[in-house]
Image: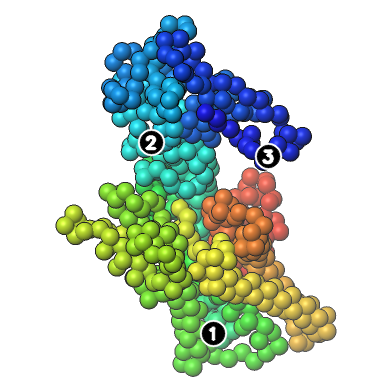
Amino acid sequence: FKRELFYCLPGLERQGSRLPACISSEFRLSLNAVEHTKNVLITYPGVNISCSNLYGETFVYASCLGLCYDAECPRKVPDGFSCINIPKEERVYTLTSNYEMTVVSRADGSYISKYFTCENNNCVPYDKVCDLVDDCGDGSDEIFCNNHFQCVKTGEYVPISVVCDGRDDCRDRSDECHDGCDPRNRFIFETKVYRITSFVFGLAAVVFNLIAFGESAAMSRKISSAVGRMNSTLIMMISLADFLMGCYLVAIAFVDTRVSESYCDNKYLWLASTECALLGVLNTIASHLSLFAMTILSLYRLINITNMVSKDGRSIKQVLKIAAVCITVAFIPILLASIPLLETFEDFFVNGLLYSEDNNLFTGTVSKELHMKIFTAYLGRSRTLDSISMSWQQIRRLTQTMFSDKYGGITSKRIHFYGNSGVCVFKYLVTKKDPQVLYSMVILVIDLVCFIFISCSYIYIYTTSMMSARTSGAATRSNATSKRNRKLQQKVSIIIATDFFCWVPFILLCWLHFTGTINGGPYYPLFSVVILPINSVINPLLYSNLITKKIEEGATKCDFGIYTYLPTCDKEDKE
């Protein structure tokens, strides 16, 4: 009987110059009570190795020959009651040369040792030892193996190589939820710092933008010009968007506090929940409402930069114009945020299905591709089913036929578009295989175009304003007016800059993830609660006269002077 381990196989002799040479040794028991014994000749590399990826008889031979530096031989000495599950005619009790009991089996006119003795006195062949299955019935054939991980609740075994790999191999997710796994996969926020940052930024955004919104609303009543009322209204919309972003940040911080200890075990229930979907919609509306309002503000200022005619902003025509702009700017983000949740488009946006825990077939998020493999095996078809042409509705219907209604059938939930991560944000990080790749990339391109347009608009406005200031005389433009324009220009420019430098790095990250250059998933929480929301906190500090004055007064009292260069405007700047 011969066994070759690893690369010591016939035909691979030429590898000897690159790898340690192979040697041979008998896996012997030195039987002296039975004639015609035959040992197994093992050929193996002449160097100690790790046995964490070996299974069955290969694990037994390697560990019991002393080849493994990280595993011990699992064999134990049998007694007269061992192997009671083996027919009498197939087992022979005998002694080794050191007078230890052993059990051998007759094969081809000879006797060979091939049984592992279980703690319950059953015996199993060596190829059933350390094979990720409890063949003994008491777990003793697996307990001394280092090649597996035992799931906490279900007790099943999975290879040690799949632990903490980001995929759920245990039905109870314990292979991904123990302390040795990456905290970014076990919690919504990997550290409490993110949670605290999210709460502080969110609370600041809520308070500051409420003040800024109220101040702009009160000042808007005093403004009579059409340009001033449009500017004030758009700034109010930006304040509203930043307020909504603050609400999202506070909410996700509370969710992380509430479920931090149990999140990993219930991760998919959260990703499929209505609460996660609502937070995703809120985040999407907030971010794009701010962006589109800023874009329209840039466009409106660009159009009116040379228009010196002051129209009455309180006329019905101007009021309807402002209302139409506001409704359009608000409607588009709401539409973009809602489309991924519509059942009509589920084939483009659903990430997978989550089935009830009482089934033994589906674990974690089950994609279309995995459904197709299971259906093909279940139906016994030689041709693989097409995951692209098959809809989620057809998949759910076919799955129901696999589980009898007599036993309760099977229930499932959709892992919706915003359930791509624990922070429940728009799925910007996509690959070429994702069904929502076109939608996400189009939105990213639109965001980038908006930022480029905003930047170019204000560069042009700033340049035009400076040229106009140089050519205008005292009769046509007072120093107060020039000063007011410069202050307002500085203020809006800083607002645009903060938005631009928050989003552009994120867009770059999404592109690198799409091309496969890097995995952007681990950076999602950082961008979601730290980088992107910064402008929601900074914006009201820049365009709110009340907040800026209060901060300046506090800084002056403390003799800091850190707000000396923040542009402010007095009452006449709002007009």
In the displayed structure image, the side of residue 350 where residue 439 appears, left or right: right
Residue 220 visible in the picture: no
Residue 535 or 188: which is nearer the viewer?
188
Which of these two is toward me, 181 or 496? Answer: 181
Closer to the camera in the image, 346 or 452? 346
Residue name at image x 43 percent, y 35 percent: 131
| Quadrant of the drawing holding the C terminus | bottom right
On the question of residue 560 being in view, the answer is: yes
For this orientation, the residue located farthest to the left is: 406
Residue closest to the eye, 369 or 350: 369
Give the CA distance from mark 2 to mark 1.
Answer: 80 Å
Residue under pointer 2: 133
Q: Dot 2, crowdedness within 10 Å: few (<14), some or many (≥20)?
A: some
Q: Where is mark 3, residue-wise? A: 12
Which label was assigned to residue 394? Answer: none
Image point 38% across, 58% down: which residue? 377
Q: How is the image coloured?
A: rainbow
Q: Amino acid at mark 1?
A: Ser
Label at residue 224: 1
